[in-house]
Amino acid sequence: MPDLRSHAIAPSSAEFGNRTRRRIAVRLLPFLFVLYIFNYLDRTSVAYAAIGMSRDLGFSARVFGLGAGVFFVSYVALQMPGALLVERWSARRMISATMIAWGSVTALTGLAHTPVQLYVARFALGAAEAAFFPGIIIYLSHWFIREDRAKATSDFMAAIPLSFVIGSPIAGWILSHKWFAVEGWRWLFILEGMPAILLGAVAFFYLADWPREASWLAPAQQQWIGERLSTEEPHSAKAISIRQVLGSRTILLLAAVTFLNYFESYSFFFWFPTMLKRQSGLSDFNVGLLGAVPYLALFIGMQVNGLLSDRSRERHWHSAVPLFIATAGFLGLITQPRSIPLSLSLLFFTMACMGSAYLPVFWAIPSEILSKSTAAAAIGMINAVGSVAGFASPYLFGYLNTRTRSFSAGLCVLMVSALAGGLLILFTPRRA
């Protein structure tokens, strides 16, 4: 229902604009936040399920590495088509459809008995999720002006660490139980897939594609936000084809940064529970409980980093510094002696996890230096190239662990990747 009080304030006043911005944020961000929590819960549920699957099915580290990575084959292939479809068709419909699809696939993964069945399920999950993330980034650019965009993105992407804060203890608890003669890890897939299906149906009716379609905004508010967004679109950037996107130095540089940063973050997300389990020897439940600590710190770091970036209007250093912190964390994990206290080891894990605090600030960059039509293709392409690392890095980490019987070699690769990604961000253009 429109906010009738807004008519008492002149549309040209600062208070009117601030009220409109707050109303949009309160309406959209909490809901999108919840959607992304379940997106990451379903995508990374295999990280904790691996503990039970290795015990019950005898899967090796290499099987889990490939199972985690094969998700990104279909995910990458459909990124750009999905992003373009979101812009040209409907973000609301695409978000709804992808959620229902991936929730169904996640629940069905609980039926897997062989490595091939796991690979097929992960491949299907990647296809189902492909349009969701670029769709959300494009959707935020339809609603939030430039000075709010990094904070809005950080509020949305804070769902990544919070999904682990919430999901880790729950996953550990589910793994430690068995109902109706069905293993806990199977219930983990089933119980985490069902909410996505329900939320996908709700999203279809709750979201609006554009401010002009939002019945919960007054006409004057619709006009104000529409005019502000149109004046911020870069006039020097014109719509370009996919072929031109692939030939753009700026977009390729952003894609290279994303590849390096996804390389270290996805390996950490998928292998952290296993590393913590082997090092600590704790029960499944306690591993899930203690595993929430680094992600709680990351949740706070994302919020602070996005807020500071918006206040200073600076993106590049706020994207690079978290990756330098992660570099130091990986170095600490590599050089730590075997007798190190668990608390100090957890500190290094937390520093390594903090690398992902770059995400909300970094994803504000493409929509600020590119036109809307160009940004749609660019964001899909950037995330697609970056997501190739999602296939390569978990598999390489598992392969190195199998060959060397140690995590040190894999951690070295992640350290170099985080350092290179942070340095490369500083060389990306500041404007179109």
Image (cartoon, rainbow, N blue to C red):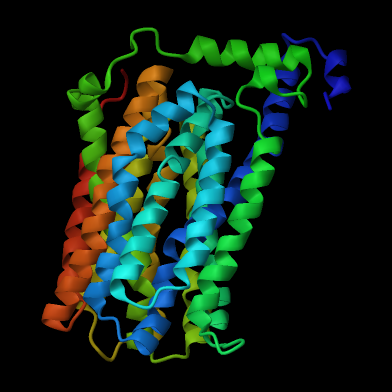
Q: Residue placed at 41% from the left, 23% from the top?
A: 368
Q: Is residue 411 visible?
A: no
- Residue 171 in the image, given as x and y percentages of width and height: 53, 75
**Left-right relation of 187 to 370:** right
Q: Is residue 143 visible?
A: yes
Quadrant location, the C terminus: top left
Q: Quadrant of residue 120?
A: bottom left
Q: Residue placed at 40% from the left, 44% from the top?
A: 130
- Residue 233 in the image, given as x and y percentages of width and height: 45, 14
- Residue 4 in the image, given as x and y percentages of width and height: 88, 21
**Left-right relation of 268 to 388:** right
Judge by depth and name the residue closer to the eye, 314 or 247. 247
Q: Measured along the vertical axis of the image, is residue 410 above or below residue 79?
A: below
**Left-right relation of 211 to 81:** right
Quadrant location, the N terminus: top right
- Residue 239 in the image, given as x and y percentages of width and height: 34, 13
Q: Measured along the vertical axis of the image, is residue 9 above or below residue 382?
A: above
Q: Measured along the vertical axis of the image, is residue 340 above or below residue 61?
A: below
Judge by depth and name the residue closer to the eye, 237 or 332. 237
Q: Residue placed at 23% from the left, 85% from the top?
A: 337
